[in-house]
Amino acid sequence: MPLVDRRARSSDPDSPDGRDRAARAVELRRVLRIGSILVGVILLIAGFVVAARYPDRSAAFLLLWTAGAAGSFVLFAVANRVPQRLVVPSTVVLAIIPAMVLLGTALEPGALLMVNSGFTMLPVAVPLFLAWTRPVRTGWLLAYAAIVAGITIITGFGHLETVQRIDLATDAAIGAFIGWIGGELLERMRSRTRDQEAELRRLNRELQVRATTDALTGLANRRQLDTDLQILSTARLGGAGSCAFIMLDLDRFKRLNDELGHAAGDEALRVVSAELRRVIRRRDTIYRYGGEEFLVVMPDSSLDVAAAAAERIREAVADLRVRAGADSAKTLTISGGVAFSLSAREHWEAVLAAADSALYEAKAAGRDRIVVAPAVVHELPAGITRDRRAPVGVRHEDTQVDGPIDRAG
């Protein structure tokens, strides 16, 4: 299991789904602010026009339309402050405001006819501008058309003739239908955009996986190791515990390639990788360090735990055999070096160097064994010295090596 859980969780604000939700909320708040300003200005200007056109009711009309404009401006002021769950209801309120103002204008027959176009279209245009989802938009338009048409047909606002009632109700229904069609067209465009964005995110994730995963074994690679060690350093500075490293190397891998072929060598790497996944803890991470080398990073682990895990790995690999044909087979063995660190400000290069040096010793001592570096590593210099006392159950031989060691073997 990786050092950092990389599964996308919808509850995680840093996950792709969480980022999408946050981006949609930001966009909806933005259009709410813009829409509330536009609706407020339109209502304010229309209020003065209607009041000037009908001086007998100018005070009532001006008060009604100004109140609608004020309500829109209030939504503008609170758009960035309302909780996310109230953003959509706030946009519904913005659509209701012009509908109520226009219904109030029906007190004057002449004024009603003058604003007939706006009466049927402004409340329809608002949800289109706000890019409501299909259920919210459809519900609003059905309710708007039914209420307006119903009130018009039943009451006629006290002064409309039958033909005028039918005409106004029809206008409301047609306006809502046109708005629904426009919303569907916009929804299709938004859906294509979302699909394209989702595909782009998928490709980006795939590229990221390919960039940080070894293609042959499926393990994390050196690039991912660098990233994870930076994250681990930050966590340790925050009070996390110790960390252990196990450096592993398949024994006589070059000979295996020469005798059985590179296909058998690749199969050996895949088989060992699968066995490593089976043996280590879920919270530990395995990396293909290079060639036939593997690295296991064990955060919050003691030296005894790491040494025991390394020995389990050695024993598990010793039971593996790789075949290149009916009569060709080879038993695998692995050598390992264990290093351990308590320092919160550790230079990981020093710890890795300690594990690598211990691995050199295991190779020189005869292979198929585990060697443990010092229990605590503190920014080791280039010439690393080690406590040669190993934990019980872990084979460790104090061997002085003269000359280079064949790591491929």
Image: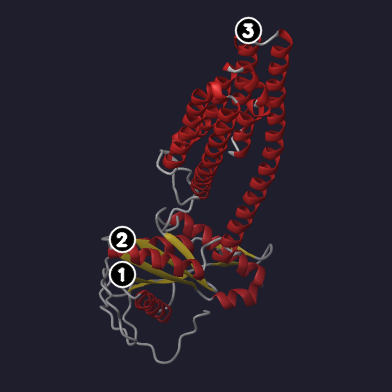
Q: Residue furthest bottom?
A: 403
Identify which residue is drawn at 46% across, 62% down.
Answer: 286
Q: Secondary structure at mark 2?
A: loop
**Residue nearest the viewer, comparing 266 with 125:** 125
Q: Which mark is residue 154?
A: 3
Whole-percent x and y of residue 226?
45, 70
Left or right: 172 as drawn, with respect to 26: right
- The three-letter amino acid code for the residue at tag 3 is Ile
Q: Which residue is mark 1?
A: 340
- The three-letter amino acid code for the residue at tag 1 is Phe
Q: Real-space Cα distance between discs 2 and 3? A: 78 Å
Q: Which residue is mark 2?
A: 301
- Give whichever of discs 3 and 1 has the lower sequence position: 3
Q: Secondary structure at mark 1?
A: strand
Mark 2 packing: few (<14 Cα in 10 Å), some, or many (20+)? some
Q: Is residue 379 above or below residue 35?
A: below
Q: Quadrant of residue 389?
A: bottom left
Mark 3 packing: few (<14 Cα in 10 Å), some, or many (20+)? few
Regarding residue 386, the answer to whether it shows in the image is yes
Q: Is residue 63 above or below residue 19?
A: above
Whole-percent x and y of residue 193?
66, 47
Regarding residue 393, the answer to whether it shows in the image is no
Mark 1 packing: few (<14 Cα in 10 Å), some, or many (20+)? many
- Give whichever of discs 2 and 3 has the lower sequence position: 3
**Residue nearest the viewer, comparing 400 with 99:** 99
- Give whichever of discs 2 and 1 has the lower sequence position: 2
Q: Real-space Cα distance between discs 3 and 1? A: 84 Å
Asked if the residue at tag 1 contacts the one at tag 2, i.e. Cβ–Cβ closer than 8 Å, the answer is: yes
Whole-percent x and y of residue 406?
49, 84
Left or right: 9 as drawn, with respect to 102: left
